[in-house]
Amino acid sequence: MQCWICAAPASATCRFCGRAVCRDDARIHPFVLEVYESGGTHYGLAVEDAIHCGICKPKPDPVLMEFLDEARAPRPNSKRKAAQK
Ligand SMILES: [Zn+2]
Ligand SMILES: [Zn+2]
């Protein structure tokens, strides 16, 4: 595998997007492995220096997956005819 950035032999892959990078181009970025709750408080198990390609942009906050919420919980008035506008 070759580095995504400079095409040198890659020595790692980005933990976030999977791009391969060489030692020179690899960056580090904290990576949250797992979040758990204890006594009403949430804790995250994190790796401080996970490999990051420097290209992709991991979001610092969770992203709402609203389309999943809708699929899981159909609205009560969904019996309305879909063809009507
Ligand atoms: Zn490189
Ligand atoms: Zn990446």
Image (tube, helix red, strand yellow):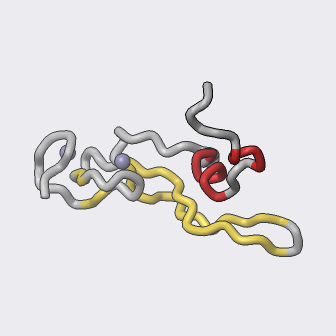
Q: Is residue 84 above or below residue 43?
A: above
Figure quadrant of the C terminus: top right
Q: Is residue 56 left or right of residue 83?
A: left
Q: Most extreme residue toward the bottom, as rendered?
A: 38
Q: Most extreme residue toward the top, as rendered?
A: 85
Q: Give 47 or 82, whichever is nearer the viewer.
A: 82
Q: Most extreme residue toward the right, as rendered?
A: 39
**Residue 64 coordinates in the image, percent (x, y):** 63, 45
Name the residue at 39% across, 50% down.
52
Q: Is residue 8 left or right of residue 50?
A: left
- How many discs mark residues in the rendered view? 0
Name the residue at 44% across, 59% down.
50
Q: Is residue 15 above or below residue 82?
A: below
**Residue 78 coordinates in the image, percent (x, y):** 69, 46
Q: Is residue 79 left or right of residue 8?
A: right
Q: Is residue 65 above or below residue 83?
A: below
**Residue 46 coordinates in the image, percent (x, y):** 58, 64
Q: Quadrant of ligand 1?
A: top left
Q: Is residue 79 left or right of residue 22?
A: right
Q: Give 16 or 65, whichever is nearer the viewer.
A: 65
Name the residue at 11% across, 45% down.
7
Name the residue at 69% across, 56% down.
73
Figure quadrant of the N terminus: bottom left
Q: Give 17 or 82, whichever is nearer the viewer.
A: 82
The quadrant where residue 13 appears: bottom left
